[in-house]
Image (cartoon, helix red, strand yellow):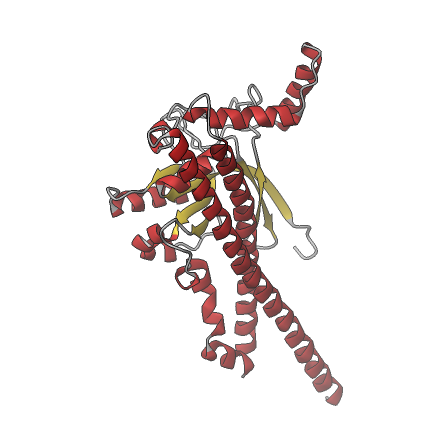
Amino acid sequence: MKISMAEEEAAAVHGNGDSDEKVLEFLDSLEGYLTLMESLASTLRQGWFELASARHSMGVSRVSSASLDLKDHLASTYLEMTQHEFDESIMRQPQFSLRKWASFENGICSSGEEKPDSPQLRQRCPSQISENQEDLSKSDGSHTTVDDLVKKERSKSLSVFGTLVSPKLRAAQASFETALDILVEVANLRSSMLSARNQVQRGIEETRK
Amino acid sequence: MAGRAPIATKSSALIAMIADEDTVTGFLLAGVGNVDLRRKTNYLIVDSKTTVKAIEDAFKEFTTREDIAIVLISQYVANMIRFLVDSYNMAVPAILEIPSKDHPYDPAHDSVLSRVKYLFSAESVASGRR
């Protein structure tokens, strides 16, 4: 009887230790989230300032929503999402990673099963993209690297605002790319913060029982 | 079920935006813009003429589309549809409230932080220690 009571006390202490660990994990995520939001605000301010400078030098009509490309096109920068299913009682914790300038010309495959009305993103084929890179380096003898393809995609994005663009517009593009990196980190921290919160909440509910 | 390895599924997805012109233009420069064959975009530019209903419709559309994983929304726009944003509780797409030029980020209004701040209330802490 005494041994079982001691075992129960030890389990309770160990349980409290686990709860403290979960609370600390949650607080770490929260601190990271707030720090990243501060960093995001600073990066966005820089981007807005550079955009305003570009508008000043290129003209208001050139750098506005009227110039945006409304013809059908795929996003060059997109997310790769991994969802981990631990068990049915725990909310899925998605993880996001950014794929920048990944929409290479002729590097997109479409699934034969895809319906025209389907909202599904047309699938990108990493193997097809790498094959195209090899073809590019072999066909004309020139050494086309991934960097060249990325530069081409960046230029394509800038060309919406005209052939010759201000260096400030290129700087704004770089700032908003950095902002995207931060936002993906924020999204991942949000995911882990909500997961930690659920674990803490579950711990509180189990303690109440 | 015990000891089963976690299953991971990977998929590609878009970033959607509901924000002012400069913010949307900047992120489109970074290559996130997508226009499908039906001319549906993954962004909504909010200006003085944009109605609350249009913002609500865009929010509902982006949060129900299967090809969108993150929705960026300016916090001042989120405040216009606060009830809708706060009642959203799915993991995907993730809703991220971002600052805008004229409205700095306010943690007090962030829907994610609102959901977790109750953990710091005296009642929840005291009940956990009983």
Residue depicted at x 64% and y 19%: A132
Q: Residue furthest bottom?
A: A2
Q: Position of residue A199 (x, y in %)?
A: 57, 65
Q: Residue furthest right?
A: A3
Q: Is residue A151 left or right of residue B50?
A: right
Q: Is residue A136 left or right of residue A92?
A: right
Q: As rendered, which of A158 and A188 lies closer to the eye?
A: A158
Residue A162 vertical position relative to residue A83 in the rendered view, above or below: above
Quadrant showing the N terminus of chain A? bottom right
Q: As rendered, which of A107 and A171 lies closer to the eye?
A: A171
Q: Position of residue B126 (x, y in %)?
A: 50, 81
Residue depicted at x 41% and y 27%: B36
Q: As rendered, which of A144 and B127 lies closer to the eye?
A: A144
Residue depicted at x 59% and y 50%: A85
Q: Position of residue A197 (x, y in %)?
A: 53, 64
Q: Residue furthest top?
A: A140
Number of numbered discs present? 0
Q: Is residue A209 visible?
A: no
Q: Position of residue A40 (x, y in %)?
A: 50, 51
Q: Is residue B100 visible?
A: yes
Q: Is residue B54 left or right of residue A35?
A: left
Quarter assignment of residue A202: bottom right
Residue A140 vertical position relative to residue A68 in the rendered view, above or below: above
